[in-house]
Each structure stands twice: as C-alpha cells, then as structure tokens.
Amino acid sequence: MEKTFEQSIKELEQVVLELEKGDLSLDDAIAKFEAGIKLSKECESKLDMAEKKINVLVGKDELKEEPFVVEE
C-alpha cells in the first residue's frame, strides 16, 4: 500500500528531528539522510501529481491558471 502525502511528510519530519539531535553515528546519519532524500522526492512527486490534477480540473471549467504567490 502506497503511503499518503501526509504519512510521507510526517516521516520526513521525524527524520529531520533525528538528524537535528546530532547523536547518531556517521553511518546512521547517512542512512537517515538517504531516507530523508527518498521521502522528500516522494513528497515532491505527490505534490506534482496534485498540481497536474488541479490544472486539469481548472482547465475543464475553462478557468484561467495563475501562478500561486505567497504574500509576505
């Protein structure tokens, strides 16, 4: 069964917390880092797919696509 985005992001957050503690051996830290990179790519892929689905849905209703801008 494939993990949801939320599950993957939660695991990634846990990996980051463990790496930030700094008490892992070098080998363990590298393994955690590799796992984090894999999770990061999974999350990015899921977000890309969601964006494509949204673009298709928006296109069906003939709405205009606009870039998302975060106001600071």
Image (tube, rainbow, N blue to C red):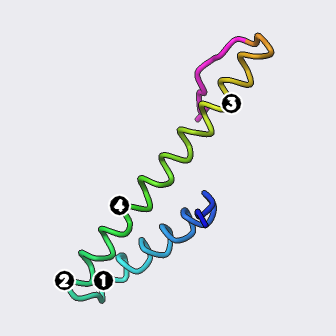
Q: In which quarter of the image is the C terminus?
A: top right
| Secondary structure beneath label 4 | helix
> Disc 2 to disc 1, how far (Cα)?
10 Å
Q: Which residue is under mark 4?
A: 37
Which mark identifies residue 26?
A: 2
Residue 56 is situated, as x and y percent measured from the top left of the image, at: 68, 23
> Disc 3 to disc 1, how far (Cα)?
40 Å
Q: Which residue is under mark 1?
A: 22
Tag 4: amino acid: Ile
> Disc 4 to disc 3, how far (Cα)?
26 Å
Q: Residue at x 59, y 27 (%)?
A: 69
Q: Which residue is under mark 3?
A: 54
Q: Compared to 40, does 12 lie above or below?
A: below
Residue 34 is situated, as x and y percent measured from the top left of the image, at: 30, 68
Q: On the rendered structure, is 10 left or right of 55?
A: left
Judge the density around disc 1: few (<14), some (14-19), many (≥20) Cα neighbours within 10 Å: few
